Image (spheres, rainbow, N blue to C red):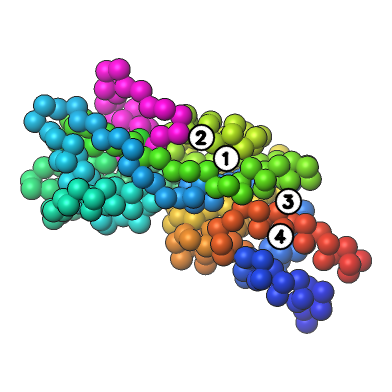
Amino acid sequence: AVPLVVAKSTALSAKNGLLIKNRTAFENARKITTIVFDKTGTLTVGKFEVSKIVTLQKEVTENEIIRLSSALEQKSEHPIATGILQKAKELSIKIPETKNFNAITGKGVEATIEGKKIAVVSPGYLKENSIALPEGFTANDTETIVFVIVNNQLAGYIALSDEIRPESAEAIRILKKNNIKSILLTGDNNKVAKSVSETLGMDSFIAEVLPHQKLEKIKELQSKGEFVAMTGDGVNDAPALAIADVGIAVGSGSDIAAETAGIVLVNSNPTDIVSLILFGKATYRKMI
Ligand code: ADP
Ligand code: MG
């Protein structure tokens, strides 16, 4: 039987934006020593807007960069995709058909359009494939960049910006006060990760991580004796959510993340995680 205090607390949590799917997760919440946060949609709003379109080839227009990339992004559920599709809509672009679509996990998307091989990818992908960054390339600290590659040639790039959630700083501050470390783990670029982590006063950040590296990082922290919670939203995050001591899926994310996690953050609000921990502590204190 579920002890009454726990049953009451679980119901209360639902009111506070938390869906507790698994009682062990709730029991464990009070033991958390480190929270590993994903960035997009948890600490940030998760709404990307195109802030810049840059073409790197004479024959390629800015509209063409959006036309090609939006065709690929139509098949993706990443928040970046939503931002690019919004831009295509604003520019009234007719989106072409794609063939052989493939999502390159944690790096981008690729497909064939009108006989050409198109890829929309992260800066990390360029590095790995020894494609040089454009001359004089700069991005500011808050821009997420995706590069558009046409037949293995860099054709241009798109800068997108997202905003930090107003509640995030408060959440990190209270965690710190309770001696809980916060780490940012993201597939996004180093500059953005550093900027978000420093703005929020987090303990550390790791950028350009691939999904399997997320899992390894959780294991590494656990082997150092940390009791680890992890937040995630994507299909990519499911393995790491499963292995964390407390897996927290962000409500706006994928169904697979929500299925794997013990707790769902219904309103995607990071301060609800703080409530969860303090709440867990109070609940079990009452029982002892
Ligand atoms: P996170 O969830 O931490 O933002 P992801 O693993 O989802 O990280 O993505 C990492 C990076 O891969 C993104 O910042 C982007 O550069 C690239 N990427 C992933 N999916 C897409 C996509 N659909 N379109 C373009 N780039 C993508
Ligand atoms: Mg993600």
Q: Nearer the viewer, residue 229 or 174?
A: 174
**Mark pair 3, 2: CA separation:** 23 Å
The question of residue 129 being in magenta is answered with yes
In the rendered image, residue 214, in percent from the top left (x then y), is placed at 52, 44
Mark 3–mark 4 CB contact (< 8 Å)? no
Mark 2–mark 1 CB contact (< 8 Å)? yes
Q: According to the image, label 3 marks what residue?
A: 32
Reading the chain from its start, which is encountered first: label 3 or label 2?
3
- Residue at (73, 51) in percent of width and height: 32
> Residue placed farthest to the top in the image?
136
- Residue at (59, 31) in percent of width and height: 198
Instruction: Indicate the amino acid at tag 4.
Output: Leu
**Mark pair 1, 4: CA separation:** 19 Å
Q: According to the image, label 1 marks what residue?
A: 184
Image mark for residue 193: 2
Category of crowding for the residue at label 1, using alpha-carbon neighbours closer than 10 angstroms: few (below 14), some (14–19), many (at least 20)? many
